[in-house]
Amino acid sequence: MGDLNAKADYVFKVVLIGDSAVGKSQLLARFAKNEFNVDSKATIGVEFQTKSLLIDGKMVKAQIWDTAGQERYRAVTSAYYRGAVGAMLVYDMTKRQSFDHMTRWLEELRGHADKNIVIMLIGNKCDLETLRAVPVEDAKEFAEREKLYFMETSARESTNVETAFLTALTEIY
Ligand code: GTP
Ligand code: MG
């Protein structure tokens, strides 16, 4: 396959944020490796994966950073956000609290990131429709008010995961 790295026209750093257990790491695993783990362990510190894709004939290398939702496991915040051009703000659509916390995550993000950062609000676990606790209208309203893109995804069933990242990356590009 050769070294995709050498061929990248652009490198875009994208950060994942949101409460613990909303599925940030599994969204990343699905997008970068097409994998999903039901027994995913809580992230400690910071991890990242890269994926190269062709957008408009240019090789875009997405460098996606994933950190702990749990405060005690989080690494230095400013370093995490430094240089990020995109952010995925993730909640679990079966957990109202994870959606209510989006305001705080957005505040932290806006406090640390570049003001032109592209932000995508993601309601994950849409495979659990029967357990839905966040109406799609609430999320849409919040996204509109805060000028965010919005999508519901399922890392488990692979629904909209690629689309969500691609939409964000295309918007950045
Ligand atoms: P922290 O690292 O602690 O911040 O959590 P996280 O947001 O990275 O959550 P993680 O990806 O580890 O997923 C938490 C749990 O939710 C795991 O048991 C996953 O298998 C499960 N999960 C993640 N995505 C989905 C999904 O789309 N649908 C369902 N049903 N479960 C999911
Ligand atoms: Mg994680």
Image (cartoon, grey):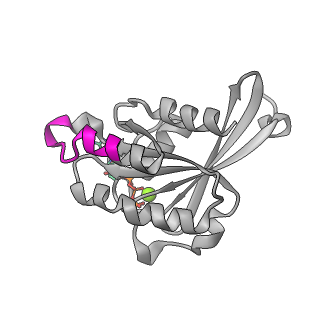
Res. 140 image quadrant: top left
Please provide percent x and percent y for residue 55: 69, 26
Q: Is residue 43 visible?
A: no
Left or right of 79, for residue 73: left
For the residue pair 35 and 9, the one nearer the viewer reads as 9
Above or below residue 55? Residue 151 is below
Res. 51 image quadrant: top right
Which residue corresponds to the image point at 35% horizontal and 52% vertical from the top-left? 91
Q: Image quadrant for the C terminus?
A: top right
Q: Is residue 157 visible?
A: yes
Left or right of 135, for residue 153: right
Please provide percent x and percent y for residue 81: 62, 63
Q: Which residues are magenta?
A: 129-141
Q: Would you say residue 77 sits in the magenta stretch?
A: no
Ligand 2 positioned in quadrant: bottom left
Res. 8 image quadrant: top right
Which residue corresponds to the image point at 65% horizontal and 40% vertical from the top-left? 172
